[in-house]
Amino acid sequence: MALQKNKKSAPMKVRKVVKANTTVVGAGATEVKKTSKSVHVYAVGRRKVASARVRLFVGGSGITVNGKPSAEYFKTVDPSGVLLANPFKVVGKDGFSATAKVSGSGLRSQLDAIVHGLSRALVKVSVENKVPLRKAGLLTRDDRMKESRKMGTGGKARRQKQSPKR
């Protein structure tokens, strides 16, 4: 095995680039951007291992998930879209559309991750939305995950190996 020499990399310079057709609206440059096409807000929602990157648009209607309409993507879990519309009902606002890219875990956890991301995005739109969303429990991340497997167990997290009877 050959020894490797320590190579020190030069520190990277980070520059903030703002395009000519982009103007900053609201709290921060990375949160709310207005381009020549539309206004959108970024947020990330999580549940178990599922992670959803949500973009909330002002105007329009409907939510697309991984390029498909939400009713088609969640047809077995939430066909009527009641759970996805919950953050908008709690806040009492309509006229938003959203796109979400979600990965990991199962469909129900992905749905909960998108709802969490939508709630966070609505807080970025207006800080007044935080209190009703917090009371409804939509801003709290549900961190229950599958327990990791331990060494020496019989295949599951807490299962013990069978001991001989005689």
Image (tube, grey):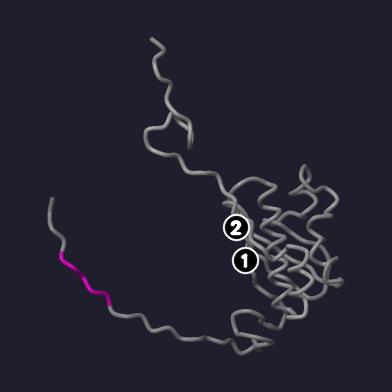
> Is 7 inside the magenta-drawn segment?
yes
Residues drawn in magenta: 5-9
Work out which residue is located at the far front of the displayed protein and give it: 166
Between 149 and 76, the one lying in front of the other is 149
Between 92 and 77, the one lying in front of the other is 92
Which amino acid, by three-letter code, is at mark 1?
Answer: Val
Neighbours of disc 2 within 10 Å: few (<14), some (14-19), many (20+): many
Image position, residue 69 (x, y; %) = 77, 55
Image position, residue 23 (x, y; %) = 66, 89
Looking at the rendered structure, the secondary structure element under dot 1 is strand
Badge 1 vs badge 2, beta-carbon distance below 8 Å: yes
Tell me which label, 1 or 2, sits earlier in the chain: 1
Q: Residue at x 83, y 67 (%)?
A: 90
Image position, residue 50 (x, y; %) = 60, 53
Distance from disc 1 to disc 2, alpha carbons, whole Å, reads: 7 Å
Would you name the residue on which mark 1 appears? 44
Quarter residue 142 falls in: bottom right
Quarter residue 88 falls in: bottom right
Q: Residue at x 32, y 80 (%)?
A: 11
Q: Quadrant of the C terminus?
A: top left
Which label was assigned to residue 51?
2
Q: Residue at x 69, y 66 (%)?
A: 139
